[in-house]
Amino acid sequence: MKSRILFLCTHNSARSQMAEALIKHQFDDQFEAISAGTEPAQQVDPRALQALENMGISGAHLHPKSIDELANEHFDYVITLCHKAHQQCRGFENASEQLVWDFPDPSHRGGVKPFETTLKEIFERIKIFALIKSKAKSKTEFDPVMFYKSLADETRLSCLLLITQQNEMCVCELTEALQQSQPKISRHLAQLKKSGLLSDRRQGQWIYYSIHADMPQWAKTVLQLTADEVTHFLEPLNDKLLTMGDRPERQLVCCQEEHA
């Protein structure tokens, strides 16, 4: 579920609107954003819309809103972007967390491109915020039940232990090692990725899977100790993997199998 953010400014005509647009453009998979003002203007400042357009972001959906319209809605984060809004809304009741990002008003700011400068500053703050919150979420949402359920399935256990040994593996390598169909292996890998146990990277036409960097250390230790102790279980799988040769040769085998 996406976290809900409310960006607040006095007039909801520039800073808060730019923040809302940035979230919707760049972080829509992580957050649901809306903006409002304590004394909303009649329209969004055209200079803010132009700054967004210069960055390739549409502002067509933006319009000033009053905080009173949102009195009955709950937000995970309420972020004030000016001192006055913070003073007026410091006791916003329907917020799990309130943050203060005090950016200068671009309409009173000096410099060549004050709105573009403010937009870039807000964007940098949002990127840091999104990174911190995504890491915190991945750590708090790690499900030990799902982890141990994965270990109880032979195919998923084999994938996790082989990847722990090899650091990373592609689908065709696991298909060869486990002697199972590619669709079946792909389904298991997708489930392990969805559970936060694996991450992937693309290199050309191949996708390589590795143990997720944010997996808790205790879980990584469980996998490593298990892989070290069950060599009799993994040895036949590694023998099949060796028949593919080294990785450059393995890629040729994979390519031939795909086009067979």
Image (cartoon, rainbow, N blue to C red):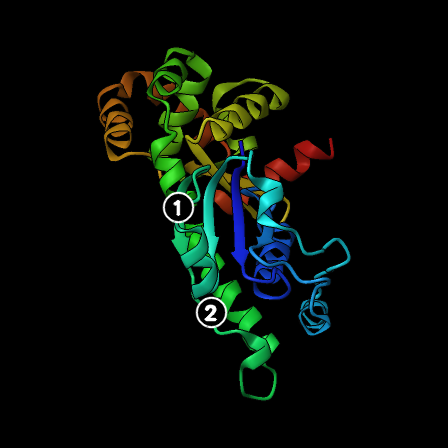
Nearest the camera: 176 or 35?
A: 35
Q: Residues within 10 Å of mark 1 (few under 14, many from 20)?
A: few
Q: Residue 187 in the image: state x and y as whole percent.
A: 58, 22
User: Is 200 displayed left or right of 140 in the figure?
Assistant: right
Which residue corresponds to the image point at 74% horizontal and 60% vertical from the top-left?
A: 58
Which residue is farthest right?
Answer: 60
Q: Residue 165 in the image: state x and y as whole percent.
A: 33, 33
User: Mark 1 to mark 2: distance in Å?
Assistant: 20 Å
Q: Secondary structure at mark 1?
A: loop
Residue 246 shows in the view: no
User: Is 160 displayed left or right of 45 in the figure?
Assistant: left
Residue type of the residue flagged with mark 1: Gly
Q: Residues within 10 Å of mark 2 (few under 14, many from 20)?
A: some
Q: Tell me where residue 119 sits by quadrant.
A: bottom right
User: Is 50 displayed left or right of 15 in the figure?
Assistant: right
Q: Which mark is residue 177?
A: none
Q: Residue 172 in the image: state x and y as whole percent.
A: 56, 31
Nearest the camera: 137 or 182?
A: 137
Instruction: Give the foreground label among 1 and 2.
Output: 1
Q: Residue 150 in the image: state x and y as whole percent.
A: 41, 17
Residue linked to disc 1: 91
Q: Which mark is residue 103?
A: 2
Q: Which mark sits nearer the N-terminus, 1 or 2?
A: 1
Which residue corresponds to the image point at 39% horizontal and 26% vertical from the top-left?
A: 160
Which residue corresponds to the image point at 61% horizontal and 60% vertical from the top-left?
A: 12
Residue type of the residue flagged with mark 2: Phe
Nearest the camera: 152 or 167?
A: 152
Q: Secondary structure at mark 2?
A: loop
